[in-house]
Image (tube, grey):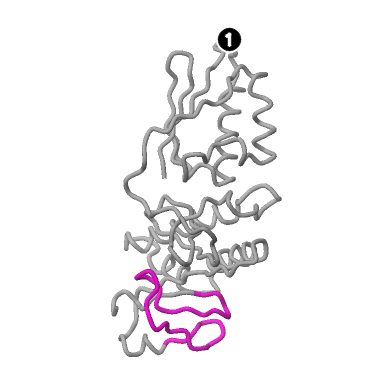
Amino acid sequence: MYTAEVKFTINKKVKDDSQTDLVELIFGSWRMNGQVLGDTYFSFIKNKNLIVQVLIPAKDSLSTKYANRYLKSSYKKLESVGLSKPRIKILGEEPHYYNKCKCKKVKEYILYTTYVQLEPALRCKKCFGYIPLYKIPPIYDNSEYYPLITWQSDYQACDTLQMNCIVGEKFGMKEMYDHQSDLSKQGRYVCKKIEKLTGKKTYYYLYTYRAKNRKKELKRKCPKCKGEWLRKETLHNKFDFECTKCRLLSNIAWDVR
């Protein structure tokens, strides 16, 4: 991942909110198109320039070649509201992140995130590197990745609740553990959508923290089909269970692992 600086030259004669509104629209569209990560941007005005700093998954993430129809429409409005085309400068590489997938061909995917993760939630099953969302077909409105991005935000909110251990801990854990929770239903829907569009198996991860004992935990069956799913070897030091039929992954409960 990289930190990028996006600079728009502004016409100060424009007194209404049309310039800032359009910039917000562009950044919102970049986010829903997987070109910008997270929803927190740092902006300031200097020497007739509106400058915004953001995280992006790859050096070329803000290239117009990835633009969807919403972005193309917004770009056409820049001059009419007194804004220049955005100028992009890569400030540096983010030091705390998982690696980007470098496989020549991705064969299978995993949908995975945590409360501290900044990377895209789509991973390569082989190398566990993250995949910029615009590298797969849009899964919403033929233009965006809204269901995946909102799922990631919701998952991180639940993970934050269970990590803070004060308010809503049980709720957060159940949402991440139960394959029939609202959170899991949304995540599994996203996986099915990606699999349909790409033709590649896409797995959903069920987080497990507590268990009565390790012996009983090792006998746990797939919660959906009740089949055997304990792997011979742990995958990426995270996934101990895998059901290829139901496209589910899980871990041996962390408190007995």
- Say above or below: 29 vs 146: above
Question: Image quadrant of residue 2?
Answer: top left
Residue at (58, 45) in percent of width and height: 32
In percent of width and height, residue 147 lies at 60, 55
Which quadrant of the rendered structure holds the C terminus?
Answer: bottom left
In percent of width and height, residue 172 lies at 43, 65
| Magenta stretch holds residue 257 | no
In percent of width and height, residue 40 lies at 44, 40
Residue at (44, 20) in percent of width and height: 45
How packed mark 1 is, by other alpha carbons closer than 10 Å (few <14, some 14-19, many 20 or more), is few
Question: Image quadrant of residue 5?
Answer: top left
Q: Nearer the viewer, residue 254 or 94?
A: 94
Q: Nearer the viewer, residue 64 or 50?
A: 64
Residue numbers of the magenta segment:
220-248
Q: Residue furthest front?
A: 104
Question: Image quadrant of residue 182?
Answer: bottom right
The amino acid type found where label 1 is placed reads Lys
- Say above or below: 46 vs 109: above
Which quadrant of the rendered structure holds the N terminus?
Answer: top left
Secondary structure category for the residue under label 1 = loop
Q: Residue furthest top?
A: 13
Residue at (47, 40) in percent of width and height: 59
Residue at (44, 28) in percent of width and height: 43
**Residue that carries the numbered disc 1 in the rendered image:** 13
In percent of width and height, residue 90 lies at 42, 33
Q: Nearer the viewer, residue 184 or 103?
A: 103
